[in-house]
Image (cartoon, grey):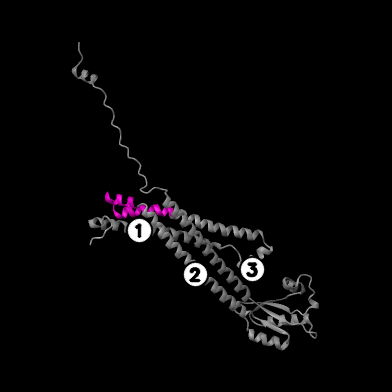
Amino acid sequence: MSDHPTQNTARDAKPQPRRREMQVRPTGPILPPANIQGNALMVVIAIMAFLACLTLGAVSMVRVTASSWQSQISREVTIQIKPDEKLDMPKALAKARDLALTFVGTKEGRILDDAATARLLEPWLGAGLKIDELPVPRLVIITIDETNPPDFAAMRTMLQEEIPQAFLDDHRTWVDRLVSMARTTVLIGVGVLALVFTAMVLTVVFATRGALSGNRHIVEVLHFVGAESGFVATEFQKHFLKISLKGSAAGGLLAAAVFAVAGIWQRQTVATPQSDQAAALFGSFTIGFTGYLGVLATMIIIALVTTLTARVTVMRTIAEIDSIRSDPARIDGVPNA
């Protein structure tokens, strides 16, 4: 006996293969992540960032050193007493110190002894000096209140009346010269920094445009297939933002490392002639928290300049393409007569 027809049909039917699910290929970047133009631009940005950060750190270091010099000089005055056969030098030194401390605005007085005076003269006259045998002026250091300095004219007059061999040096001349020199140095440093930034901006602009000229065909293809100008500009902007961040980070970190290594060297070579001379001329090689913030700001500025240049250049390229398409006579680069 035969089976039911519907059962035979179900038995003879073959199972249909399952339809394969559609797989969307992962989208890749429109621009190649690394090419010759991009690598060259990254190197240029790294070099300019290094120079800019190095100049910024040097200006910050000079400014702090000059401010320290000015502060150290302005908070002390010196009383010089010239040697005289009729003068009892120890009593004259003590009397000069006591007279100076009677004025409002003075904090403390310190008499430089023979050993301290000999150390001051050692670079010129050598070691083993006998101060008593030389006509060397003796010094009294008076610490003053910077916010409320004493009346230097009255102090000078009283000292000359009581001790004719005494002379008050309030360092005003040296302070004025130091302030002028510090301001000039900072202005020169700011000028150099401005020149470095200008060169950096121009170099980044031309390098970015050069790198974009090598990818012009990509812009044309994307624009011809209907991509909007904003989309194309955004894609190029992201690409060059990554390049600029890598280059500026490399240059900025290298400059920060230079200052860090110089500071470590200075700390490890304390009390050596080389370190003392470098400290006397340049101060501490540390740029501090403000200096490192300046380095970070420089890196951000470089990245923003590069990104903005890339966006503007892409928008101009697309506008030029549209202009050529609207005027067939310019397709071969010949303007319409």
- The quadrant where residue 12 appears: top left
* Residue name at image x 63 percent, y 61 percent: 266
Q: Secondary structure at mark 3?
A: helix
The one nearer the camera, 149 or 219, is: 219
Expressed as whole percent of the image width and height from the top left, the position of residue 123 reads: 72, 71
Q: Is residue 261 magenta?
A: no
Q: Which residue has dot 2 on it? A: 191
**Which badge, 1 or 2, is on the more N-terminal residue?**
2
Q: CA distance from mark 3 to mark 2?
A: 24 Å
What amino acid does circle 1 point to? Thr
Neighbour tally class for label 2: few under 14, some 14-19, many 20 plus, Cα within 10 Å: few
- The quarter of the image holding the C terminus is bottom left
Q: Main secondary structure of the magenta part?
A: helix
Q: In the image, which disc is placed on residue 313?
A: 1
- The quadrant where residue 256 appears: bottom right
Q: Which residue has dot 3 on it? A: 280
Position of 249 relative to 63 (above/below): above
Q: Secondary structure at mark 1?
A: helix
* Residue name at image x 66 percent, y 63 percent: 274
**Which badge, 3 or 2, is on the more N-terminal residue?**
2
Q: CA distance from mark 1 to mark 3?
A: 49 Å
The one nearer the camera, 166 or 2, is: 166
